[in-house]
Amino acid sequence: MKRVSLTRYLVEQQREHGHIPPQLRLLIEVVARACKHIAISVNKGALGELLGTAHTENVQGEVQKKLDVISNEVLIEANEWGGHLAAMASEEMDSIHVVPNRYPQGEYLLLFDPLDGSSNIDVNVSIGTIFSVLRKVGHARGVSEEDFLQPGKQQAAAGYCVYGPQTTLVLTLGDGVALFTLDRETGSWVLTEDQMRIPEDTKEFAINMSNARHWAEPVTRYIAECTAGKEGPRGKDFNMRWVGSMVADVHRILARGGVFLYPWDRRDPDKPGKLRLMYEANPMAFIVEQAGGMATDGRQRIMDIVPTKLHERVAVVLGSRNEVQRATEYHAG
Ligand code: AHM
Ligand code: MG
């Protein structure tokens, strides 16, 4: 079997389709390398004294874990000197990180959730890194938060890494979705699946059921119909899975279908949802759509939303097309 490394995949994509500028290729390779680094730290766990809290809070008021902070630093350090970026933004940083003057400025903007699924870090359950790539539009010198406020449909690339039983990288450059698995013996990312497709129908849903009493009516109705099973209006039994790490839940959906919901709820009615639009929902929506699935906030396509701030939150319904469509129609009604 021909082994295709990430580097070879990118070179061949460039030759065949000519849509990967050198700076974007470098960006993807650098992020993938940083993820290997993060994977090593995640693996060490208690042996590296890397578990537990960092005793700090991020801009969203969440207590940071040591590995949240380390992963953020790894991504910043890996990406700031290569000349491919103008600036970065992260779940773990209040404001944007502009590439320092001592390095050349590139044309891309990188956003990331350095370690998604923080509550699972200390319990040895799959966690991951999510990233989104935008172009810096306009040629004005300097870069500000405004430059980041682009709808998700303008993403040049998106991906995530799962640190689980296997370390995997899922990537889209806007031409389908490819899966790479880290070969720990050679240290290289090997293409293990190309053009991934999400089945249009599913019998599996993912939602945090403990919030059921706070949901809005359309979500209550949708889930009630799923749990009513064969005897209910859907006429089939549904299964439920909730890892609590979006990367792992989305990856399962990419692999075998399903629907993931993190809806608005009454616990904090002023927040549109829990998940963050720019570095969680948008990159996942791009991947899911590229695999034939669908992603909405219950009303509109996630990638059409024009962000008004960096850390904006959003409700999320994504996965198998027919289920997302149904849940979204319930909201419209
Ligand atoms: P994080 O970025 O701080 O880890 O939070 C996001 C996570 C998602 O990975 C996951 O889907 C969700 O929060 C789980 O939330 P809950 O603990 O409410 O089930
Ligand atoms: Mg997250």
Image (cartoon, helix red, strand yellow):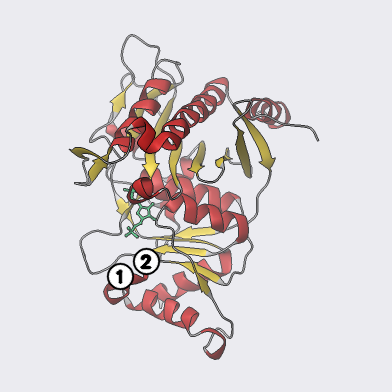
In the rendered image, the vertical position of residue 36 relative to residue 126, given as above or below: above
| Residue 288 drawn at (x, y percent) | 54, 53
| Residue projecting furthest to the front | 47
Image quadrant in which the C terminus is located: bottom left
In the rendered image, the vertical position of residue 292 relative to residue 282, given as above or below: below
Q: Nearer the viewer, residue 307 or 43?
A: 43
In the rendered image, the vertical position of residue 3 relative to residue 222, given as above or below: above
Mark 1 and mark 2 in contact (Cβ < 8 Å)? yes
Q: Is residue 195 left or right of residue 266?
A: right
The three-letter amino acid code for the residue at tag 2 is Asn
Residue 112 visible, this orientation: no
**Which residue: 63% across, 28% down?**
185
On residue 208, which mark appears?
A: 2
Q: Secondary structure at mark 1?
A: helix
Count of numbered circles in the view = 2
Q: Is mark 1 within 8 Å of ligand 1?
A: yes
**Which residue: 48% across, 56% down?**
249
| Residue to which mark 1 is pinned | 211
Name the quarter showing ligand 1: bottom left
**Which residue: 20% across, 61% down?**
270
Image quadrant in which the N terminus is located: top right
**Which residue: 34% across, 40% down?**
149
